[in-house]
Amino acid sequence: MRSLFSRVLLSNWLFLIILLTTGLILYFVETQVATEFKFVLFVLYIIFSMLIAFHTSFRIATSVTEHLIVIEKKTMEMTKTLMSPFDNAQITKKENALVNIAKRPKLIWSDYQGQLNWSKANLKCEEIQMRLPTMYELKMAYDSGITDYWRQNGNIYWSSQNSTELKASETYISILSYPYAMFLFYAIDILDRSSYTFFRSNENSVRCVQWE
């Protein structure tokens, strides 16, 4: 990023130097040409300045876009790494045993609570004497089939878990190396049981849970 800012700063200075140099040249030329040509010189200077400004802006925009694409790719790779413990291929025998529990009446789900950010969703569940579900509970609900009718309200549902609750040995990445982990919370897509992480400011569907 430091090199990007340096390039932007140098481009701005180069743009100013070119305009200043061109202006000085035109000032000198103006004293050597007839009066009827001075307006033409002024118009040409304006057109030249606009072309230089467009070229400089285009180069800056291209540089910024290239850096943003690299950052986005790295973020997606890190997110996939954090999501890996919840992939279907890594479900343990203990989790498979819990799938059957979701079919029992002891696990009670609330009605649809709306599209909320994570903080408001957590507060909403506390207000109705319930809580946000864990990822295991959401996956149990999916496996039991009760999420089929949830799709009319949305397909991405918040969980109570954030990235810092995972052990480094399970994620193959140290939480200390990913400073945004404490602000990322897991959610599940009830269309295909896949897991995602979102910042708490994102808005997703909310259903609360409690054990009877």
Image (tube, rainbow, N blue to C red):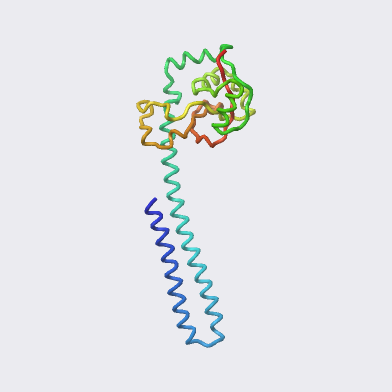
| Up/down of 182 relative to 140, above or below | below
- State the quadrant of the C terminus: top right
What percent of the width, then of the height, locates residue 165? 43, 26
Q: Quadrant of residue 63?
A: bottom left
**Percent coordinates x, y for residue 197 in the rendering:** 48, 32
Which residue: 53% across, 77% down? 42
Residue 50 shown left or right of residue 180 in the figure: right
Considering depth in this image, is 66 or 181 the residue closer to the camera?
181
Residue at image location 36% in from the left, 28% down from the top: 168
Going 55% across and 87% down the picture, which residue do you hit?
35
Q: Quadrant of residue 22?
A: bottom left
Q: Which residue sits at x=44%, y=38%?
A: 76
Viewer-proximal residue, 30 or 37?
Answer: 30
- Residue 156, above or below 32: above
Residue 11 at x, y = what percent?
A: 42, 62
Using the image as rendered, state which of residue 156 and residue 183 is in the foreground. 183
Q: How many marks?
A: 0
